[in-house]
Amino acid sequence: MENAIAYLVVFAIIGLMFWAIIRENDQKRKRSAEQYERDVAEAKESLMRAGMLELDKFVGNRSGKTAAVEYLKDEEQGMTKTSGRNDDADRTEVEK
């Protein structure tokens, strides 16, 4: 008897899941143009955010990114080039 009740509960949950999927599909088919455009706009924003968060995980840690940005800024200003005695004049000369 207990097994029968457990099976009925499981079948009821599976049936409710199928019913919910069918109902959602019907609502999507019957929505207006404004609702469709709103759904598309929300989907783009959520996909963009999810993509950026995943990209941030792969790029690396925060301190490494900050150091890279600072290095690029210094390089644009010409601060990373040295002008010691042993440096090649052509390599360290700033182009104008």
Image (tube, rainbow, N blue to C red):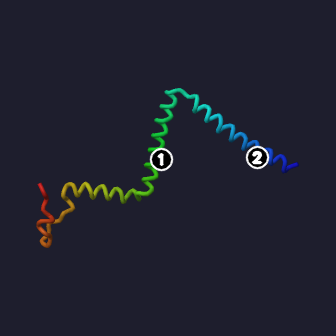
Sooner in the amino-acid sequence: mark 2 or mark 1 = 2
Q: Residue at x 69, y 37 (%)?
A: 19
The tag on residue 82 is: none
> In which quadrant of the rendered image does the C terminus lie?
bottom left
Q: Which residue is mark 2?
A: 10
**Rendered location of residue 46, percent (x, y):** 48, 42
Q: Nearer the viewer, residue 82 or 15?
A: 15
**x then y, percent, for residue 52:** 43, 49
Judge whether 45 appears above or below 35 on screen. below
Q: Residue furthest front?
A: 29
How many residues crowd around disc 1 within 10 Å: few (fewer than 14), some, or many (20 or more)? few
Is residue 34 left or right of 29 when viewed as pictured?
left
Whether residue 4 is situated above or below residue 27 in the rendered picture? below
- Place of residue 47 in the rendered image (x, y in percent of width and height, measured from the top left): 47, 44
Of the residues shown, which amino acid type is indicated by label 1? Answer: Ala
- Taking the view exactly as shown, the residue that stands out farthest to the bottom is 86
